[in-house]
Each structure stands twice: as C-alpha cells, then as structure tokens.
C-alpha cells in the first residue's frame, strides 16, 4: 500500500511540475486572453491517456506503474485526463448509460457549480 501511495505522490509531483512549466512558458512568451495553457494540458493529457492505455493493452505494465502514470502524472497534469480515462473505461466496459450520465453531469454540473461558486463569492475580496 505504501509503495502505491508513494508512486502516485511522486507521479503527481512530476505532473504538477510539467503543468507549471507549460503555464510558465505561456505566461512569459504568449500574452492572450484565451486559456491556451489549460486547453493544451487538457487536450495533451487526454491524448496521452488514450495513447498510453492503448499501448499498455498490448504489453504487460504493472498496476503500480499504471497508477504512477495515469493517477499520478496525468491525474496531476490535468484532471481532464482522468475524466477522459473514466469515459474511456466506461465505453470499454460497455457501460454506455453510465458514461452518458457521467459525461453530462460532469460538464453541466461542473460548469454550473463553478458559476454558482463564483456568484456566491463574487462580492468577497
């Protein structure tokens, strides 16, 4: 158990640093009101999770290493990759109804809650 926890923690640290470096690069060299860094890490994370999952299905990769990559690095790099992994897992397992509910709930409720939270705290300085 402790090895798994350390594996996820170490991977999480790597993912967070990678995300920071992308944000730092855009902050320093590209001025834009569009959230390019977030879009890039989210899309890159989704692509990487798909590529690695497909590759790992062809070769043996230990559960601990999968946790290091998927939960640690990519989960910290972007939560969108974890979302994509959940959706892909449900499709893979034939859980189409759950996938649709999860997809809609995550997007609609997530955006709604972010908006609600903003409205609730907008007057707080």
Image: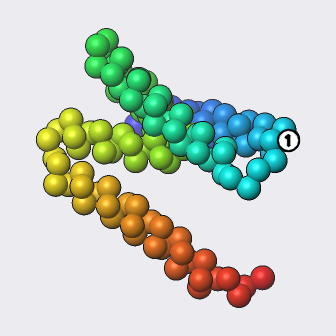
124 to the left or right of 99: right
Q: Which residue is mark 1?
A: 28
Q: Residues within 10 Å of mark 1 (few under 14, many from 20)?
A: few
Residue 124 position, x and y percent, is 72, 85
Can residue 64 be seen here? The reply is no
Find the residue positioned furthest to the right: 28
Question: Which residue occupies 84% across, 38% down?
Answer: 29
Relative image position of residue 28 (x, y in whole percent): 85, 41
State whether residue 66 is above or below residue 109. Answer: above
Q: From what the image shows, is residue 62 above or below residue 79?
A: above
Q: Is residue 30 above or below residue 104?
A: above
Residue furthest to the bottom in view is: 123
- 81 or 61: nearer the viewer: 81
- Is any atom of residue 30 visible in this view? yes
Answer left or right for 25 relative to 7.
right
| Total count of labels | 1
Q: Quadrant of the N terminus?
A: top left
Query: In the image, what residue occupies the spot 59% across and 85% down?
Result: 120
Q: Position of residue 83 (x, y in %)?
A: 40, 47
Label 1: state its secondary structure: helix
């Amino acid at each position: 158990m402790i090895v798994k926890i350390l594996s996820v923690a170490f991977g999480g640290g790597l993912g967070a640093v990678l995300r920071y470096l992308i944000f730092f690069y855009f902050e320093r060299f590209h001025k834009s009101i569009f959230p390019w860094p977030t879009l890039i890490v989210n899309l890159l994370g989704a692509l990487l999770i798909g590529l690695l999952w497909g590759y790992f299905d062809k070769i043996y990769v230990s559960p601990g290493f999968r946790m290091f990559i998927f939960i640690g690095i990519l989960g910290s790099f972007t939560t969108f990759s974890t979302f994509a992994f959940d959706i892909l897992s449900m499709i893979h397992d034939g859980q189409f109804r759950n996938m649709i509910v999860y997809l809609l709930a995550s997007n609609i409720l997530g955006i709604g809650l972010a908006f609600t939270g903003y409205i609730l705290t907008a007057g707080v300085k």
